[in-house]
Amino acid sequence: MIKRFVIAGLIMGALVGAVWWFNFSFKPQMIADFMSKMKPPAASVTAEPAKLERWSDRVHAVGTLDATQGLWIAPEVGGIVSEYYFDSGQDVEEGQRLVQLDIAVEEADLKSNKATLKEAELNLARQQSLVQRRASSVATLESAVAKRDSAKAAVERIEALIAQKTILAPISGQLGLRNVDQGQYVSPGAKLVSLQALDPLWIDFPVAEGEVADFKVGAKIEVTVDTYDGEVFEGEVEAFDAQLSQENRTLMVRGRLKNKDRRLLPGMFAEVSVIAGDTQERVTVPRTAVTYSLYGDSVWVLKEAEPGAESKTSETSESAGAGAALAAEASATAEAKEHAGDAKDDRPLLTVEQRFVRVGPSQKGRVAILEGVKAGEQVVTSGQLKLQPGAAVTVDNDGALKPSNQLPKQ
């Protein structure tokens, strides 16, 4: 009887051990083997061929528009505004009267001084006649000349004061908003209205020390502003500053832009592209195709998979039992479905290769690749974060990104 209990206990222990081994050792190992041999699904990306284009070397910068002539209209002397002769935003010509300060006192003084001048001139003429007849001394004549000159200077002083209180436009241009009213007292230097010459305009922009020698005065420039997205305004380099900035080692460059329609305004932030050389052929890719990192710039290039790469064989153990058979059957089923999908798409299986490249200038949403990619090769333009070398991919350009033509703001 005891022998039977021992045998039954051994059998029960063996069964418990077998169940424990199957659930906690064999089964997890088979699942891990099955998952490790599963083929990952192909990542969906967008792609575009690298193109061979003729580009001019360019220097990119950002700058600010400024009027070639611009100022605030301000009185030289204080006074009461008796009248103004302009409206906000009006075009004016050089010498046009803008503001008149009260000159009633000055006009009265001018009449008095003119009368004094006339009397002095008559006295001088009389003394000159007497001296010619030797009826008066030279000293008396000289005194008459001095009085005439003094009276004349007094008249000129009053006329100059009246001119100061008559405010004229010093240049031709467009006025800004009026900051003065009739009857208002204005002090010397008070800003009454802005006057800007809008055609042409200047644009001042910094250039790095290493790019100073890439272009000269007269080089063509293309300017874009956020206000008129995508529209290019043309001009040329007019002058270079005489020294580099000691803070950031840049040189200020001044360009001149035509602005006949006056859509550009002083103070606008602008992006500048200086055409720095002759045109030459460049291999270019979309800006979104380049991945920038501290280890180097790279692109993902599409390649057709080698024959047989899409099928992988797996080794199974003879003692795998029912679990191994199920795993092999599931793997075969998944592989058969994948091959069926590939046959349905009738497209070659593609993989990706990461290539480190040497990046050149960029323009209009594209980047020149100086080394690493050939014209015609397909490069991934979006979906790079899902990729690893040798990964299978499918191309879906329906959701392709459209890169902006504008440079990021600095």
Image: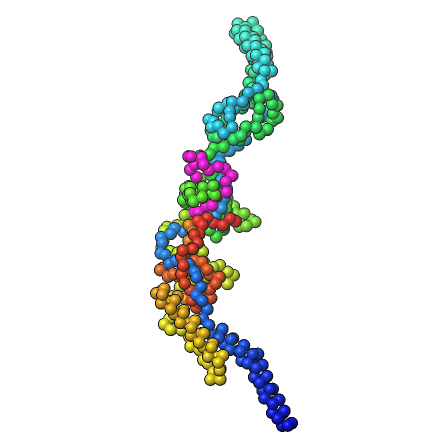
Residue 117 vertical position relative to residue 222 in the rendered view, above or below: above
Dominant secondary structure of the residues highlighted in magenta in the image: loop
Residue under the point 49% across and 73% down: 35
Q: Which residues are magenta?
A: 257-274
View extreme (front): residue: 1
Percent x, y of residue 392 = 42, 67
Q: Is residue 29 above or below residue 374?
A: below
Of residues 6 and 401, which is closer to you in this image?
A: 6
How many numbered callouts? 0
Q: Is residue 190 left or right of residue 47?
A: right
Percent from the top left, x then y, of residue 63? 50, 44
Q: Position of residue 373 (x, y in %)?
A: 39, 61
Q: What quarter of the picture does the N terminus occupy? A: bottom right
Residue 61 shows up from this direction: yes
Q: Nearer the viewer, residue 241 or 321?
A: 321
The residue lying toward the viewer, choosing from 195 and 147, is: 195
Task: Judge whether residue 171 can be spotted in this image.
Answer: no
The quadrant holding residue 334 is bottom left
Residue 29, how many percent across, how many down? 53, 78
Q: How is the image coloured?
A: rainbow
Residue 321 lies, with reference to residue 158, above or below; the image says below
Q: Residue at x 57, y 6 (%)?
A: 136
Q: What's the residue at 44%, 49% (across, down)?
A: 405
The reply to whether the magenta stretch includes residue 22 is no
Q: Residue at x 48, y 75 (%)?
A: 34
